[in-house]
Amino acid sequence: MQDIKTLHQLKLPQLSETDEESLIVFWHKSEQDVVKKGDVIVEVQTEKAVNEIESDINGVIAQIHKNRGEVISVGEVLVSIWPDEGKNDETDIPNSQADESPKPIQQANDPEKSYFVKASPRVRKIARDLGVDLTVIKGTGKKGELTVEDIQNAANAPKKQEPDEEFSKEKTRVIASPSVRKLAREKGIDLDEVQAWSTNGRIHREDVLKFAEGKDYNPQQVSIAQQSAQNSNDDDMERVKLAGIRKAIARSMTHSKQTIPHVTHFSEADVTALVSHRDRIKKAANAKQIKLTYLPYVVKALTSALKEFKELNAAIDEGEETILFKKFYNIGIATQTNNGLVVPNIKDADRKNISGLAREIEFLTSSARNSRLAPEQMKGGTCTISNIGSAGGQWFTPIINHPETSILGIGEIVEKPIVKDGEIIIGKMMPLSLSYDHRIIDGVIAQKALNHIKKLLEDPELLLLELD
């Protein structure tokens, strides 16, 4: 048997200059799996993209240190691996395929034992939460693997109690959820000593935290709103760590609103002609495997406006107190994914025709939804489009994607009665919402830019359409 010191630790690398932690997205390997150098072991999500972490050696996974959905910092251990040194002796590496029988139970004080216990990451986590020693339990699962039921039975098994513990059983039963009990254990607090201020005598997280801080917790000083929140059952709530893309969104949106004085103008374009134009060429586009939506037209119109009104395609260097007018046009497409909102951008959108834009939009949004965006696809945007039309939205106040200076929001195309040439007709109307940085963009400039976009969308021939 190898010494525990020979275990190879695969740690989370620095995936970018700014990311200090990642979210565990998916484990491709399990404990006791054989791995080869270059095998993908786990997918982790930074604030920008999902990255695959590969094994850097041949061997067998001894322990997985983080569960799916948990956050891990740069430099922390992802997995411990028994290295394969090319020996033929199967006892050198604990391989479940080489040894079909359950591993022998060792003493609890053996530090090596935890690496040989057959248990999934979920079972190990439950054991940690319940304070159960895995090394003294016999597994009833397949090939001696420990199951959740084994852990629960061990946790519920009667323990030999000292007289003072027997006496404590005569006290009033403490009412607290498992999550609160776990918090108390982590902080070394006896719940019998914690004052429950709620009307039903239940101890809540706030009770434990206040007790841990050594503060007096007077129920009379608690506001009605706080008391209402505390009286709710902890088991009725789910606490999820703000991490990964969601954490990046929260920080970015907060920074943008606190830094940029936002103003939003609203309008709507009669896109009846645009709808007809798209319907006419949609069949030809489909024949060329092009998914033609309205977004390429909007990108084209927006790019034209950015060239005409350079303030909308700029950025402020706050340190140097200068305005950077950009002469390239990378249009971001805000894309909703299961993990949150991401904004990949179309590089040099002004150099692409409608079909080229359609292809790239489909590629970028598909990559985003499948967590396959590269960091480069998220960098260098100059202006963003946010589309809530697919969700049935109309007008809204989109938040600028800092350090950009403008963002265009588009809503669902709906039929409305409009007046044209003195007659009431039915028009197909697209809601438009343009938010801009009022530090460098005046209201008149913003309105002229919005009018420019509207004009092009109402007359698609002006966009010089052509299909490959």
Image: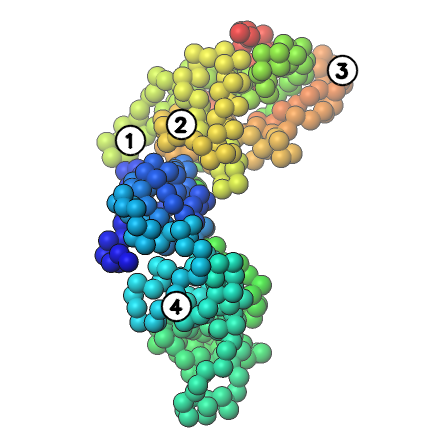
Residue at mark 4: 105
Along the polypeptide, which appears first: circle 4 or circle 2? 4
User: What's the amino acid at mark 1?
Assistant: Asp
The N terminus, quarter of image = bottom left
Q: Residue furthest front?
A: 88
Spatial separation of the CA atoms under disc 1 and disc 2: 22 Å
Label 2: element kind: helix
Q: Residue at x 46, y 68 (%)?
A: 138
In depth, the one of 224 and 115 nearer the eye is 115
User: What's the amino acid at mark 4?
Assistant: Ile
User: What's the amino acid at mark 3?
Assistant: Glu
User: What's the amino acid at mark 2?
Assistant: Gln
Label 4: element kind: loop
Along the polypeptide, which appears first: circle 3 or circle 4? 4
Residue 333: image location, x then y, percent: 48, 28
Crowd band around label 3 with a 10 angstrom C-alpha radius: few (<14), some (14–19), many (20+) = few
Residue 321: image location, x then y, percent: 26, 31
Q: How many labels does the image show?
A: 4
In depth, the one of 306 and 205 nearer the eye is 205
